[in-house]
């Protein structure tokens, strides 16, 4: 059984790698329309990719295809040199209703009578789901979450893994897991306290499943801007992404890597990390181009990675 389990795991890894290479090949041909089941991927601006959860009839609930395709999509984006910023949005009336209970929970069912053996087999599945959002954090390109209306359960896990969060006036958020007998296990409990800098409030929201609105989300630091409606939100998110994409990709991606690292390490370790990073990256041609463009009062031109 152990040998069979390893073989199945290796097979899934190979199949996943093939899918990622197919997605990346599509991106490189300038075709953002790779046919995902749960996502719609487009290039609305130069160097900017929009990844939209695309199950509006199911309120963008996160099914098994979603958990797999987000990893494939963001691994391909991370490796695509022409993409410099990403916007994540939701199609239809709401951002996301969170977990698709009927579809996803069935995949977590493990047969057998012994609890310890079932737990050993279930653990890797949970870690696979965790990677769905960790892959956003690992992606060196800045990711902007554009939230309209409801952002429930797994939606909070998703946006806390993003770099910047924007929302509409009618947006609302809810850490829903305790209401269905679960502890949130794919990122909210680990990232939200660091995002908002208020451990007490993060615990209150997680323990009570209390719904909170856009203004409170901005006040606590979960989102940085509020827009009147979805159209204005997407325009604002894409404009912000374009501004980021106009900067040196070496500088921007180095900044993200350093900030993610520094969040989880002491200040001195963060300083040592960025010193090591810049000992190489300060030799980039982008530094010279940025300085010359500033002196000549022109827009800098940076080559793709």
Image (spheres, rainbow, N blue to C red):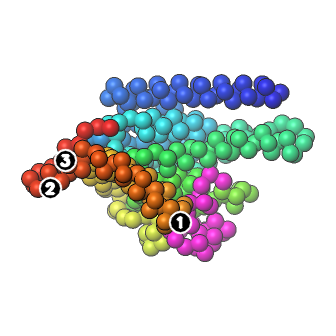
Residue found 36% across the figure and 53% down from its top: 278
Residue 240 screen position, x and y as percent: 30, 54
Quadrant (top left, top right, bottom left, bottom right) of the N terminus: top right
Residue matched to label 2: 294
Mark 3 is surrounded, within 10 Å at the Cα level, by few (under 14), some (14 to 19) or many (20 or more) other residues, namely some
Residue matched to label 3: 289
Badge 3 marks a residue whose secondary structure is helix
Badge 2 marks a residue whose secondary structure is helix
Q: Could you tell which of marks 3 and 2 lies nearer the N-terminus? A: 3
Q: Is residue 205 magenta?
A: yes
Residue found 45% across the figure and 34% down from its top: 76
Q: Which is more toward the observer, 54 or 221?
A: 221
Q: Could you tell which of marks 3 and 1 lies nearer the N-terminus? A: 1
Asked whether the viewer can see residue 154, the reply is yes
Residue found 60% across the figure and 25% down from its top: 14
Quadrant (top left, top right, bottom left, bottom right) of the C terminus: top left
Q: Could you tell which of marks 2 and 1 lies nearer the N-terminus? A: 1
Magenta range is 185-214
- Residue 288 got which mark? none
63 sits to left or right of 139: right
Relative to 304, is 237 above or below? below
Q: Which is more toward the observer, 294 or 72?
A: 294
Number of callouts: 3
Relative to 107, is 133 above or below? below
- Residue 266 got which mark? 1
Residue 185 screen position, x and y as percent: 66, 53
Cα separation between marks 2 and 1: 34 Å
Asked whether the viewer can see residue 145, the reply is no
84 sits to left or right of 292: right
């Amino acid at each position: 059984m152990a040998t069979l389990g390893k073989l199945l795991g290796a097979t899934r890894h190979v199949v996943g790698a093939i899918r990622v290479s197919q997605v990346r090949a599509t991106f490189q041909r300038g075709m953002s329309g790779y046919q995902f089941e749960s996502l719609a991927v487009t290039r609305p601006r130069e160097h900017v990719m929009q990844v939209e959860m695309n199950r509006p009839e199911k309120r963008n609930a996160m099914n098994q295809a979603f958990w797999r395709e987000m990893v494939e999509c963001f691994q391909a984006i991370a490796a695509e040199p022409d993409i410099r910023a990403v916007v994540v949005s939701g199609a239809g009336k709401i951002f996301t209703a969170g977990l698709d209970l009927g579809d996803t929970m069935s995949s977590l069912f493990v047969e057998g009578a012994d609890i310890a053996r079932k737990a050993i087999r279930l653990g890797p599945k949970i870690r696979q789901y965790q990677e769905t959002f960790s892959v956003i954090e690992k992606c060196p390109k800045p990711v902007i979450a554009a939230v309209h209306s409801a952002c429930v359960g797994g939606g909070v896990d998703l946006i806390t893994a993003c770099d910047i969060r924007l929302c509409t006036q009618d947006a609302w958020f809810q850490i829903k897991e305790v209401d269905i007998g679960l502890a949130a296990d794919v990122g909210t409990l680990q990232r939200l306290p660091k995002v908002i800098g208020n451990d007490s409030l993060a615990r209150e929201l997680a323990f009570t499943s209390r719904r909170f609105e856009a203004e409170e989300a901005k006040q606590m630091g979960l989102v940085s801007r509020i827009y009147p409606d979805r159209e204005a939100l997407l325009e604002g998110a894409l404009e912000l992404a374009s501004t980021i994409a106009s900067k040196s990709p070496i500088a921007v991606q180095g900044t993200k890597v350093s900030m993610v690292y520094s969040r989880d390490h002491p200040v001195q370790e963060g300083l040592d990390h960025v010193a090591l990073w810049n000992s190489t990256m300060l030799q980039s041609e982008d530094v010279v181009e940025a300085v010359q463009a500033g002196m000549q009062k022109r827009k800098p031109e940076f080559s793709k990675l």
